[in-house]
Image (spheres, grey):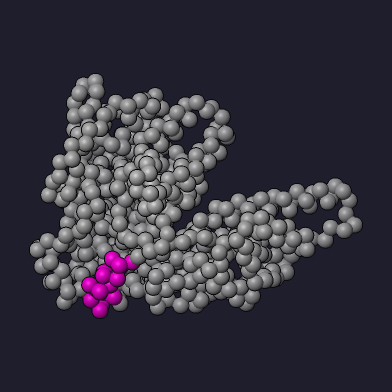
Amino acid sequence: MLLSKNNFPLYTRESPTKLFSKNNFSSSFDKYKIVPSFKYEKRSMKNITIFSSPNNQHFSLKVVTNAPSIIMDDEKEIISQNANNGIGIVEFFEGKNILVTGGTGFLAKALIEKMLRTTPKINKIYILIRAKDKEAAFNRLKSEIIESELFKCLEEIHGEYYKPFILNKLIPIVGNIYEPNLGMDIITSQQIAQQIDLIIDSAANTTFDERYDLALDANVNGPYQLMMFAKKCKNLKLLMHYSTAYANGEREGLILEKPFSMGESITKEKINSISPFTNFPSLHVDNEIDLISKLKNNITNNIGLEQIMKNLGVESAKLYGWQDTYTFTKAIGEMIINNMRDEIPILILRPSVITSSYKEPFPGWIQGYRVIDPSIFLYGKGELPAIYCDQDTDVDLIPVDVVVNATMAAIAKHGYLQSPQLNVYHLATTLVNPVAIHQLFDYCYEYFTLFPFVNSKGDKIEVKEMKYFDKISDFSNYIWEVLSKQHKVQDLSEKELLKIHMRFKRKVEFLNNFSKLYEPYGFYRGRFHTGNMRILMEEMSEEERKNFEIDASNINWKDYLTRIHISGVKKHVFEGKKLPI
């Protein structure tokens, strides 16, 4: 948790105070004075010396500027060698030891399956799992991964040798990414640090409107603790971190694949583009965390604190130019990684909206209720007859197996190079294969007309073509109108009318809140540049393009949504369960 006494300050290379401690937090950052010396090194780094009082002991941080990437002669030689035979994806993963965080989640689980299926000579995959002890961690590995339907293809390949194979490859590690040494015991952490070649960071809190303290703990403190651990890994060839394309916040137009630097904000970026001499406060992460600590100390009502933390996250995000708490804290997490990386090669992948598998290991696999699914299934159940959005806004979708393939290809490419740089990839489709919101719901209309849901009375639920509103008031009025037509209210007593009115009111409030949550995406004005993805595809051999398909330009979204995705969600998420709507 954010107030754990074992967590360290975000800006220190040592652990002089317990940053997230309830007692020490408010003064933890007041002890440091930052003095820039503007001394540039070979890779365009600034040395910043931090003097710690009262002992006046000092240490330095290197803040990496956004210098352009330079391909050195040895890198050119590697690229030239790989030009004939592709990147060498399968060969790269042979014999490698990999640490994976968030390994039981949707994306990481799909990545683990693909690595085991296509690169069986991989050595060990250490999976960090939150559990009380080793037995509990193994039980989670067994139930959530080994016995998962996702791994059935791998089981068919290995037959009776499946369990020995997978138990030899997958090693559950008790830990917590929010804690020093990732929550591992000292001996385990030392052993892992000596052995691993790669770190794959897939741990995150993805709730749009999460409590600010919880989101900071997961998406900011998590990367900080991971970077602290990564510095101990002497054989580390690459650290790969999953972010999100929407970490670009409220940027508009063509959004380039550039990293975030500590303290920058989208609001400041926009203001300076119009008025270069206008000052807007920089984003100070320490101030944000200090504010949270003070609020927690002063508010004793947990119910009130819950809502205050949610509101604070959204307000802070909006102030600095992000659409919600999730994207804001993911961007800060990127800043932390860039700020701390020193000589560690870093790869940041920013997928857009990840959906069910397109082809591998089989079409339609998905875990959990993902971003677009609530709207689709509310519509299919007749609960969402209209939507608050610009119907021409593109929905940037990318199937999970395309993300996984791009991940392995990019890891291999930059793992070979081992250049001490930070490379950012947008894994997105809008520029190469756009689909608009109105197209998405046209396809859903076609699907639910052919395969309607059935209500509790056994009647088929009839859907109508989706209506679109760009004003929330018009949206609300239309929902009231639809509800009134659906329920006859004549010849009812005053008590019954009041009861129906309250039910209508609750439903409208729910849909209004739901629509406001998705509002930034329904009116999104950005398009993600995917130049690095295109270059990656060009560097792959013909065989690699076939076995690690990353070209999303040929996906037929109508076929994918009506034949694969919707039925996939029904089967893998809701089969035998009541829809959570």
Looking at the picture, how far across and down is residue 361, in whole percent? 39, 70
Which is more toward the observer, 177 or 446? 446
Left or right of 2 in this view: 199: left
Which is more toward the observer, 569 or 243? 243
Residue at 39% of width from left, 55% of height from top? 248
Which is more toward the observer, 271 or 480? 271
Magenta segment includes 542: yes
Residue at 10% of width from left, 67% of height from top? 77
Point out the stretch of residues depicted in magenta. Answer: 530-545
Is the N terminus in the top left, top right, bottom left or bottom right quadrant?
Answer: top left
Based on the displayed image, in which of its 4 quarters is residue 153 positioned? bottom left
Based on the displayed image, in which of its 4 quarters is residue 106 positioned? bottom left
Q: How many marks?
A: 0
Based on the displayed image, in which of its 4 quarters is residue 14 positioned? top left
Is the C terminus in the top left, top right, bottom left or bottom right quadrant?
Answer: bottom right
Looking at the picture, how far across and down is residue 395, in whole percent? 48, 66
Looking at the picture, how far across and down is residue 462, in whole percent? 69, 71
Q: Is residue 151 visible?
A: no
Magenta segment includes 525: no
Residue at 45% of width from left, 72% of height from top? 434
Left or right of 212 in this view: 233: left
Main SS category, magenta section: helix
Q: Is residue 336 above or below residue 490?
A: above
Q: Is residue 481 above or below residue 294?
A: below
Q: Is residue 292 visible?
A: yes
Q: Is residue 323 above or below residue 396?
A: above
Residue at 38% of width from left, 27% of height from top? 26
Left or right of 43 in this view: 303: right
Looking at the picture, how far across and down is residue 537, in whole percent? 28, 72
